[in-house]
Every structure is written in structure tokens, then in C-alpha cells.
Image (cartoon, helix red, strand yellow):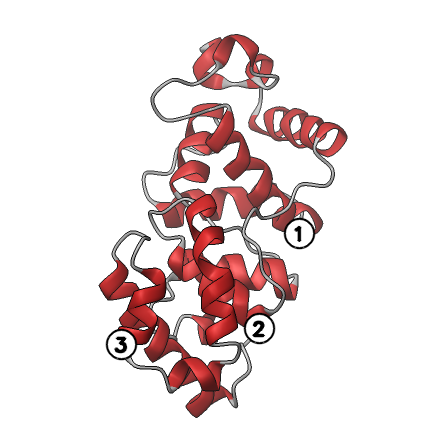
């Protein structure tokens, strides 16, 4: 099987069987998504969704969050992973949005990456979901699934991202992130992948050995 055939088959299956997947994070604005994605680092979306309603109610705008104290924000996010550093990042991120971007979330990856707490993965998530930028965010799930399936041999997140973007049409990149992350979250899990029942097994390099 050629790389082109593998991509074509896998994208084709997802397109037919998972046409409407979306982020499991709950948000109503670019600012809310940015906050949620920062909180989701090494934390489950389920936990983040439990935390954000009260956080968004208390601090509905970048201006409100920028003016918050550490203790006010920490009290609302303390149940997520690394709550102290994330509290600091959220307040600093909001301050920079207000000071440098007029309180608006920028739509391009380089600008997003100037915000505290925003790395390339977070920037790609926000840019693709909210602004339809043709980028693919590679987290641990996407990295693992891409290598197992044989979509990439990249040894770094950046290398896998480059391979995926080179082989997935621009029009499918935003949804491809969700396809891969959800497949990794529920089927191709880290410790016990469900290979016998995985619908992608006919095209999976690790399963077929070729």
C-alpha cells in the first residue's frame, strides 16, 4: 500500500462515517475556546467542561480576566492539571489580548503564539476551529494515531504536523484534527488500542504490518 493510498482510504472512511465531528470542548466565542484549550493541556475535555461555565460567568471578557487576581482565577480552575501555572497563563494571556490586540483573539498562528500559555498546538486548534485556517494541531493522540496508522514516521510533533498537512487537502485539515484526536481518545488508545474492532485496521500499518 502506498502512502497516497493509505491517506485516501483513511480520509475516505472518516469522511463517510464521521462527517460531523467537532471539538468536545464547550465554548461560545474565540476567547472562550482559547481559554478552554489552554486549560485542556494534559487534562481531559470533560474536566475542562466542568470548570469553564463558572469561569466564563465570572470573567466573560479578556478585560475581566486581565483584571482578575490570581486567587480569584485559581479558585475556579484548581481541579484541572497544573492549576497554578494555568492561572498565571490565563491572566497574562488576557492582559496581552487587551494590550496588544484590542481584546480580540488574533486569527493567525504566529500572533496566537505570542500569547502566554499558547504553544503551537493550542494556536493551531484555535486557528483551525474558529478561523478556518488550514492547519492541523498535533497533540499526543494525533501524534500516536498518525504514527500507528502509518500516516507519518515523524519523530517530533512538528514533523508529524508537516506530514499530515502535506497529504491532507486544505479543506479537510480542520476536521482531520478531530478525526484523529477522537480516534485516539476512544479507539486507538495509548495502552489498549481496540484493534480487533477498529474500522481503520485494513489500512493501519501497525495492524497489517505493511
The number of numbered discs placed on residues in the rendered structure image is: 3
**Viewed as shown, does residue 173 lie left or right of 83?**
right
Which disc is residue 170 wearing?
Answer: 1
Mark 1 element type: helix
Q: Which is more toward the observer, 46 or 121?
A: 46
Query: Which is more N-terminal, label 3 or label 1?
Result: 3
- Name the spot of residue 122 as percent of width and height, x first: 44, 59
- Name the front one of labels 1 and 3: 3
Residue 71: horizontal and vertical position, in percent?
26, 74
Residue 69 image point, x, y percent: 30, 81
Q: Residue at x 43, y 42 (%)?
A: 160
- Residue ID at (33%, 47%): 42
The label shown at residue 70 is 3
Q: Where is residue 8 in the image (x, y as percent from the top left)?
A: 67, 29
In the rendered view, tell whether residue 173 sits above or below residue 131.
above
Q: Name the residue under label 2.
A: 107
Which label sits on residue 158? none
Amino acid at each position: 500500500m502506498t502512502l497516497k493510498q493509505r491517506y485516501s482510504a483513511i480520509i475516505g472512511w472518516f469522511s463517510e462515517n464521521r462527517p460531523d465531528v467537532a471539538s468536545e470542548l464547550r465554548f461560545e466565542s474565540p476567547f472562550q475556546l482559547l481559554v478552554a484549550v489552554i486549560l485542556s493541556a494534559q487534562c481531559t475535555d470533560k474536566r475542562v467542561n466542568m470548570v469553564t461555565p463558572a469561569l466564563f460567568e465570572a470573567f466573560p471578557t479578556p478585560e475581566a480576566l486581565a483584571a482578575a487576581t490570581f486567587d480569584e482565577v485559581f479558585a475556579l480552575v484548581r481541579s484541572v492539571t497544573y492549576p497554578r501555572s494555568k492561572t498565571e497563563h490565563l491572566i497574562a494571556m488576557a492582559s496581552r489580548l487587551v494590550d496588544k490586540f484590542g481584546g480580540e483573539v488574533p486569527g493567525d498562528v504566529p500572533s496566537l503564539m505570542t500569547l502566554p500559555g499558547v504553544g503551537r498546538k493550542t494556536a493551531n486548534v484555535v486557528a483551525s476551529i474558529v478561523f478556518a485556517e488550514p492547519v492541523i494541531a498535533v497533540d499526543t493522540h494525533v501524534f500516536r494515531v498518525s504514527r500507528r496508522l502509518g500516516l507519518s514516521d515523524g519523530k517530533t510533533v512538528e514533523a508529524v504536523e508537516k506530514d499530515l498537512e502535506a497529504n491532507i487537502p486544505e479543506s479537510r485539515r480542520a476536521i482531520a484534527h478531530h478525526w484523529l484526536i477522537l480516534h485516539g481518545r476512544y479507539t486507538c488508545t495509548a495502552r489498549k488500542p481496540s484493534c480487533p474492532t477498529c474500522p481503520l485496521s485494513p489500512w493501519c500499518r501497525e495492524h497489517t504490518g505493511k
